[in-house]
Amino acid sequence: MKTMKLVTVFLMAGMFACITKPDGLALVGGGLLDTTQLLLIDDSIILLRGEFVRVSGHRSVTPLPAAAEKVDMKGRVVCPMPATIDESQMDTPALTMEKFLEQVSIRRPLIVGVPLDSTAWERHILALMRAQRVVIAPQLWKLKPGPDLERAKKNTKILLDEEIRIIVAPGASAEQELALLAAAGLDNKQLVRAYLQNSSLAAGSNASLLVLLGSPLASWRNMFKVERKMILGKWQAGG
């Protein structure tokens, strides 16, 4: 009889655990930065399961399971964590126009640095870069104030105006790099895109995100006003 009672208790406990187990983690009511269209979705729901985003969008069109563990994000903005860049690709700066063109000719997809000796570009080179979808990491922060930096800033703006993608690697130098790009003439949306263009919180994306105190679309500096961060579905200690 006692055995039967114990079995019943364990079965009931197991059923109760299944019933009360959270159906994912839902970040509710905050702004969601859509990096594809560069717009802010107010009153959003971001439903996470394990290491991935299950679904995200405005509350009116995004299902919220009753059993999901809910976290109030009201007054905050959630944006994806900037994508990392393979460090092995970041050690070959292009310091002259000749060296830069060599990088283009070997179809290097990511070119680090911009020419410091010239700001004269041939149209066919720019067309080739667009066709090859070359991405440029200017690394302006590595240059000392002076003529080299000014030429690098001008070249960066020329490339962006010619629809060449500019990217900023995350890390300790990112905020300084973005400030220099702003000084080079990039507008706020271009700066946000340069930092977050390979990141997303769309369905199926990694659940790696930042909880911000303000919208990056109001000021790119808000990308560095981080209240909390999550990596692959786990909140990180100390922020």
Image (cartoon, grey):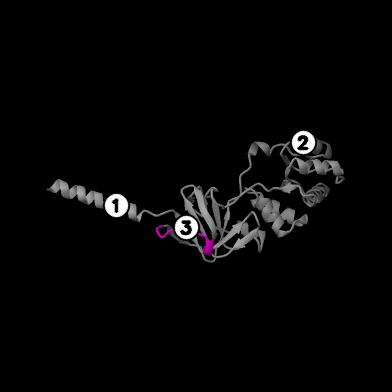
**Residue bearing the label numbered 3:** 26
Q: Is residue 94 left or right of residue 229?
A: right
Q: Secondary structure at mark 1?
A: helix
Magenta-drawn segment: 58-67
Whichever of labels 2 and 3 marks the residue nearer the N terminus, that label is 3
- Inspect the image, locate mark 1, and give the three-letter code of the amino acid beneath it: Met
Q: Is residue 58 above or below residue 152?
A: below
Q: Secondary structure at mark 3?
A: strand
Label 3 neighbour load within 10 Å: few <14, some 14-19, many 20+: many
Task: Say which mark, if any, is on residue 15.
Answer: 1
Task: Say which mark, if any, is on residue 103.
Answer: 2
Q: Is residue 36 left or right of residue 230?
A: right
Whichever of labels 3 and 1 marks the residue nearer the N terminus, that label is 1
- Inspect the image, locate mark 2, and give the three-letter code of the amino acid beneath it: Gln
Q: Nearer the viewer, mark 2 or mark 3?
A: 3
Residue extending furthest front? 61
Residue shown at the point (52%, 66%) measured from the top left: 74
The span from disc 3 to disc 1 (Cα, nearest Å) is 23 Å
Q: Nearer the viewer, mark 1 or mark 2?
A: 1
Q: Quadrant of residue 186?
A: bottom right
Q: Is residue 120 left or right of residue 222?
A: right
